[in-house]
Structures are given as C-alpha cells and as structure tokens.
Amino acid sequence: MAVPARSTRPAPRHVAAPTLADVAERAGVSRQTVSNAVNNPDLLRPETLMRVQEAIETLGYVPNRAARNLRTRASNLIGLRLSPIWEGTASTAMDRFVHSLVWASREAGYHLLLFSDDAPFTRDPGPMAGYDDLLRSTAVDAFVVTDTFLGNPQAAWLRERRAPFVAFGRPWDDDAARHPWVDVDGAAGTSAATEHLIERGHTRIAWIGWRKDSHLGEDRRSGWTRAMHGHHLSTSGLASRVEDTVASGREASAVMLDDAAPTAFVCASDTLAMGVLHTLAERGLHAGQDVAVVGFDDSQVAQVVHPGLTSVRQPLEEVALALVRALEDLLATPSVVAPAQLLAPSLVVRPSSG
Amino acid sequence: MAVPARSTRPAPRHVAAPTLADVAERAGVSRQTVSNAVNNPDLLRPETLMRVQEAIETLGYVPNRAARNLRTRASNLIGLRLSPIWEGTASTAMDRFVHSLVWASREAGYHLLLFSDDAPFTRDPGPMAGYDDLLRSTAVDAFVVTDTFLGNPQAAWLRERRAPFVAFGRPWDDDAARHPWVDVDGAAGTSAATEHLIERGHTRIAWIGWRKDSHLGEDRRSGWTRAMHGHHLSTSGLASRVEDTVASGREASAVMLDDAAPTAFVCASDTLAMGVLHTLAERGLHAGQDVAVVGFDDSQVAQVVHPGLTSVRQPLEEVALALVRALEDLLATPSVVAPAQLLAPSLVVRPSSG
DNA sequence: TGCTGCGCTTGGATCGTTCACAAAGGAGCC
DNA sequence: GGCTCCTTTGTGAACGATCCAAGCGCAGCA
C-alpha cells in the first residue's frame, strides 16, 4: 500500500499543497485512479469514485496547473492583446467585450491572459513580440485577435506560425484568411438606425463617418446608403468623412447643417455623435426635438449624456460566446475551420432621436 | 557529448519546439549551462555564453513555461478579478486601471490573468471560489484586489489563506489588515476641486455624494468639508447623499437648487455630475456659466460631454506601478510588509467649472 | 475446474525545466 | 612537481501531473 515515490520525501514542507499521490495514499488507490476520478469519473466504480472524492474533499486537493500543463501541452489560457487606449474617444466597447470574454471563457474552462505590445527581454522586439513569446513558451493555447483593420499584420503573422486564433472582426482585405471569425453586421445597424429615423418622418438624414480607408467605417456607411436608397431618398451632399474625434464631429456637423440642412444625423460612432450634440448645444438646438442624432456603440456616454443618445448596440456578449465556441472547435479539430459568424446589432432608442 | 535523455527519442515531432537539451547539444554544453545562460548569464565564461546564445538564436528556443513553473513553483501571473460592470455608470476607471496594470506588470515580467466570480467545477461555489482555485492550483503567484469596500470578504479571506496580494484601496474597516496597499487620496481631490471653485469666487458650493455607509464617499466628502471650513464657508444644507446613478444626481441637484441655491456642485463621481448637468439642461441653465460643476474620475464621459466636465483624475498609471512594485517586494521577502502608499489625484479643468 | 473476456487498477515512463551536488580545469603558492 | 583554492561545467534527481501497457480480480461459459 506504500507509495515509494513519495515516501522518500524527507519531511512535509510548511504549507505543502496536497498532490495526487497524497490523495491516492489516503484513498488507498493509485495515482492513475485519482487522475481518472478527476478527469474521467465514469471509468471508476461508483464506490471507488466516492472514496476518492472524499479524500479529495478532505485534503482540499486541487490539481497543480503547471504539472498538468507540462504533461498535456495545454495551458487553458487564452491570450488577448490589449490595444492602446485612445482617450477622449467614447467607444469603450473594449471594456464590455473583455468582460464578456472573461465570462464566456470561464464557462469553457479557460482563463484570459492579458498582454500588451513589446514584451521585454525579447531578442526581436516588435509588434508581434508579445504573441511570439507567449506562443513559443506554451503560455497560452490560443489568441483572440480584435483589430482586423487594414494592414494589421496580426492575422497573417499568426496564420504563418500556425498559431490557433479566432478574430473579432472580418478579415477585410485578406482573401487568403482561413481562420474562424465573428463580427457584427455594422451595415445592418446603421440601416436600422436610418429606417428608425425615416419612420419618424425624417427625409434629410446625414451621415458622419470615418475616412474612406476604414473598412469598418465604409461598411457602416453602406447601411445608411442602403436604407436611404431603399426609400428613394437622396444621399448626395449628406455624407461627411472625418477623424474619429469629438472635435471632428462637431465641425463636420456644423458645416453639414449650414450646407445641407439635414434634420437628422447617423454617426459611425458615439464619439462623432457627441460632436454633433456639441454643435446643437452651441446653436441652442435641442437634440431629439429640433434635430435627431443616432450614435454607434451604445457606450456609457450614450447612456448618461443628456438627453440620452440613441445608439447601435453591438451584441458583445454573443460575440464573446461565439468566439470561445469557435476556439473550442478549433483546438479540438484544427483541420475543420468553423464557419464565420455575422451577428446583428440592436438599436437602443433614447430621446436624442425624438 | 551525447545526451542520452533525449537521444532515445524515436523521431522528432512534426513541429517540435526546441528544448533546453536541443540547445545544449547544439552548443556542445550541458543543460545546466544553457539554463544558466538564460537565468544567470554572469556565471558563464563570455565565450561559452556567446556560443550558447547563438544556439538559442538559431533554434529559436524559448523556455517552456509549464516546465519552469512546475520546477520553480511560480507562474509569473498576477490574478485580477473583474468586478461586474455597472452599466449606466460613467466611472469606468476600471478600463484605464487594467491597461495600466498590464503595462506595469509587463515591465516586471508578469502577465495579468483575468477571472470572474463563480468558477465552474468547484466543490464550494461562492464569491471566493475563483480565488481559491487559482491559488491552490498554482495558476497565479499573487492577486490584485480592487474593491476594498465595507464588508468585502476578499482581503480577510486572502490573509487567512496566506495568499500574497496587494490592494488598490485602503482597508477601511479592517484594523487587522497587514497587507500592502495603494490608494488615491480622494479627500485631497475633492478639496482641490472645492478650492478651485472658491478661487473662482464661489461661496455656496454644494456636495452631492454617496450614502453614508460608503467609506470612499465619506472620504471624498471630507475633502469638500475641509476646504469649505478652511475658508470659513458654511456647509449646512449643502450636502446631499444618494445612490450613484444619473437619476439620483439629477433629482438631488434639482432639490438642492430649489432649497439652497448653490452656485456650484462638487460631486463624488462623474455619474452624479452628469445628473447635475441633466438638471441644468432641463432648466435652461448653462454649466460653467450659470452654475459650476465638478465630477470625479475623469471618465470618458467627462472628456466628451458638452461643454467638457471638470473632474478629479486618479493617477491610475502610478497606482498600477506602485502595486506591481509592492507585489514584487512581497514575493521577494514575504515577511517585510511594504509601506502603504497614498497618491494624490489631479484636477482636470474644463469649461463646466467656468 | 479451467479458460476467456471484460473492467478496473497498477507501476513505470514521460513532459522540460531547475536544484543540489560533484567533477573538471586552471591559477597561484610553496 | 604537488598541493590547495576557485571558477566553470556536468550529472542525477525532482517538481506533479498524464499516458501507456501490463496486471489483477471477477463473472460467464464449457
């Protein structure tokens, strides 16, 4: 009944965590049986299982992660790179997204490992250094990639290294991409916003969006165009493309009001919508009464600003869930690529749209 | 020169990551020498070191984390529990804090592990289950605790288990606490805000804060009281204590304007300040011109709202840095408790204060 | 009674690293 | 030359889990 491997240990350490062998000894079974009790309970006879579980309970045994990771070559960790904060921008969808991701990962038995650019102590510093180190040191099992904007090397780089990853965002300009991705149908969101305004009687609805080189921005713009043309409304002279800042939104909306006299604005972001609200406030106009405004992201700003900003809300909880599911599939059967998913956002109506 | 332990390996795996032994073989030294080259370079003769480093470079060797963790009983991971999001609240200091913490940890060679309540597959579900599992499974080396509010069992629980942790926030009501902590001097922040308003000629300055059972709220309130009394200004009838919501701030400020006719408001949060802005907008009053308003947290809302909300900004970057330093000290010499640190916030002045 | 098959249990090997200790090599001194 | 001393390198074991293949008991069957 003795377990030689551990009986040779001179003396118990001060606060020694119980090991598999300790549990085995107490339950009067072998290590493998305890391992099975934890990982494949249905392999054990019910009475044996109960005895082992009692021993686990009594000793307060929890498997050592490092040892398990070493043997199974898996860490149960998902890597997420935190992109730099852009202060002064309202769109902190990231916060909600991280929360959702933590929650979704937990359900699948994963934890989230956060990292940022430029890991130190690296031979080859650069934007991908963080990924490289984590990957090679087997610190994480997979990555979640968030910024799939034009020219972002992450996806291509990860693909080249055969690193498992899923993306939040379409591979806009990379036809060779073969990774699972989940995205929100931005066009559907702005289309719904525009339809909502048309229903309320608006016909001169302006668009304030981002510069042309932003796929995301052009996608959202297309929803506005689609809805307008669907109702035979003109869009000429009603579109403006600027930087994603409050100041840009303010200026663009001021010019737009002078030149084209729209009665409503649909914006590519809450940040731009806040710029529109600034312009209205400066001119003594009331949002929702004189001019309607709709933003994008349902950020906290939209929720707390006066009088309440109507905004397109991304289903980030669903996105996170879909991403984790895709990740599980990917790790289980790497050869089969999970189908891409496009989720529909919803419109949160508040007083700013009348 | 042969390395028996690995030469018995039948055939290289498909994408086998190089190991220490591979590097050793290539460089013509032993495993221990390679290990030293990585962890204690100064123990090697320069020429040997160079030869080993070349081999490491060529093979692209990165130490396997799981193996290292197993041997050293350390994971180089810091655990952070994500508290539930309260939507509709402007104070997402959490986002900035997490960023800062990731950055600061990185400098110290740590990564951040995010988790949430109620880890699954636990014998003893409860608010501390997540901590317990991570701790016992040696998944993290230490924790950063953020909510040190009244009755929060985290600190006491962690102390009892002898778990290494540092806290962002004072142990308000726990005199037995002996852990390192870092906090922001909220009273200094509100005091500075009040002084700022007094300088601008205000004498009737109201306080809108949280309920009395919030130590954080009472601390911030004391800064307002201190500044007012320091200038021999009365505070009677000028304080209001409510829930941390926009609606509460709106109602409280409306009542306050009717009853006490203040010319300025200092608030315990940006959320409450937004409520004040709502009231002003409803009454056709202009923030900064007719009535001054100061918030707390310098949230994104403060930055983008019209006309720009003056707010107290917490030095979260410094907080994160101090926390990580305290953590390093704690892990290096557990017996010596690092001194607590109280950091001063700054006032970001915007048009809402005139 | 003896044999086969099944289900559960067992000991040994292994993952890749670091620790403890031993051995080798060179310099300096008598 | 022989000795000691110090620096640098090498060897075996250990960390704690899982995988593998063999071993054991028990029931069923002839």
Image: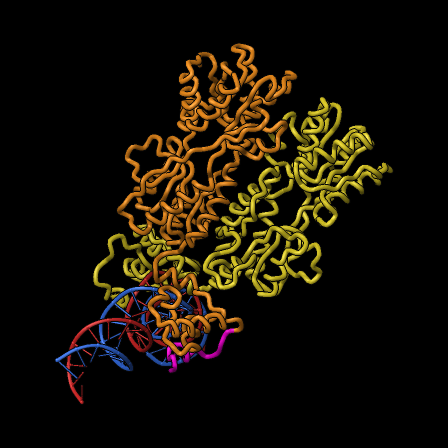
Chain colours: A orange, B yellow, C red, D blue
Q: At which x and y percent is residue B253?
A: 74, 33
Give the tally of numbered discs: 0
Which is more toward the observer, B310 or A33? A33
Q: Which residue is located at x 33 percent, y 48 percent? A: A329
Give the extent of the magenta segment: A1-13
Magenta highlight on residue A2: yes
Which is more toward the observer, B336 or B26? B336
Instruction: Judge from the rendering whether residue B235 lies leftward or rightward of residue A127; answer left or right.
Output: right
> Among all residues in the image, which is located at the extreme top?
A259
Instruction: Judge from the rendering whether residue B122 lies leftward or rightward of residue A150; answer left or right.
Output: right
Q: At which x and y percent is residue A133?
A: 39, 49
Which is more toward the observer, D6 or B341? B341
Where is A170 relative to B59, above or below? above
Q: At which x and y percent is residue A278?
A: 61, 22
Q: Main secondary structure of the magenta part?
A: loop
Q: Which residue is located at x 42 percent, y 27 percent? A: A187
Q: Which residue is located at x 44 percent, y 24 percent? A: A191
Where is A216 relative to C20, above or below? above
| Whether residue A208 can be seen here | yes
Q: At which x and y percent is residue B118?
A: 51, 55
| Whether residue B1 can be seen here | no
